[in-house]
Amino acid sequence: MPSGQGSYLQGGPTDFGTAIREAFRNIFTYQGRASRSSYWWFVLFEAICCVAFVILVDVPLLVSHSFNAGVAILGIIGSLGIIVVALTQLSLFVRRLHDTDKSGWWYFLALVPFGSIVLLVFSLMEGTPGPNRYG
């Protein structure tokens, strides 16, 4: 493996399935690194989940024009799923920042105007080769 690439938490590259499985397995792990492939595969997974959520919950509501208990249950389950995915994404993004040798505290840039653009640029940057302060 090229220098700087190792296991999942050392910023090693992953495929789609491994990225999703390891992201959820490390939902509360804020140490280590996450490669670009690990991060962006998970972003793709999030997008697929959002589309599925809209199809399962919003479309039946629009078609029936009335309250349906089954749709309400799906909405509750989906909302809990969104919370789990959001927590997973937070820890993954902190590890992505670590891969670029930046502190996870940079995540708070999302709270200021245009800070999300800076975070997008950080997420697109290549990880630092070899060891850095975070692994």
Image (cartoon, rainbow, N blue to C red):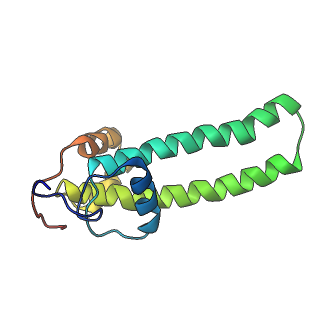
Residue at image location 64% in from the left, 59% down from the top: 80
Residue farthest to the top? 63
| 82 sits left or right of 89 in the view | right
**Quarter of the image holding residue 113?**
top left
Foreground residue, 93 or 13? Answer: 13
| 54 sits left or right of 20 in the view | right
Foreground residue, 2 or 35? Answer: 2
Residue 97: image x %, image y %? 26, 55
Foreground residue, 74 or 6? Answer: 6
How many marks do you count on the picture?
0
Residue at image location 25% in from the left, 64% down from the top: 7
| 114 sits left or right of 73 in the view | left
Residue farthest to the front? 1
Residue 50: image x %, image y %? 58, 41
Residue at image location 45% in from the left, 55% down from the top: 20
Q: Quadrant of the C terminus?
A: bottom left
Residue 124: image x %, image y %? 25, 41
Residue 114: image x %, image y %? 33, 38
**Quarter of the image holding residue 26?**
bottom left
Q: Quadrant of the N terminus?
A: bottom left
Residue at image location 83% in from the left, 29% down from the top: 63
| 102 sits left or right of 80 in the view | left
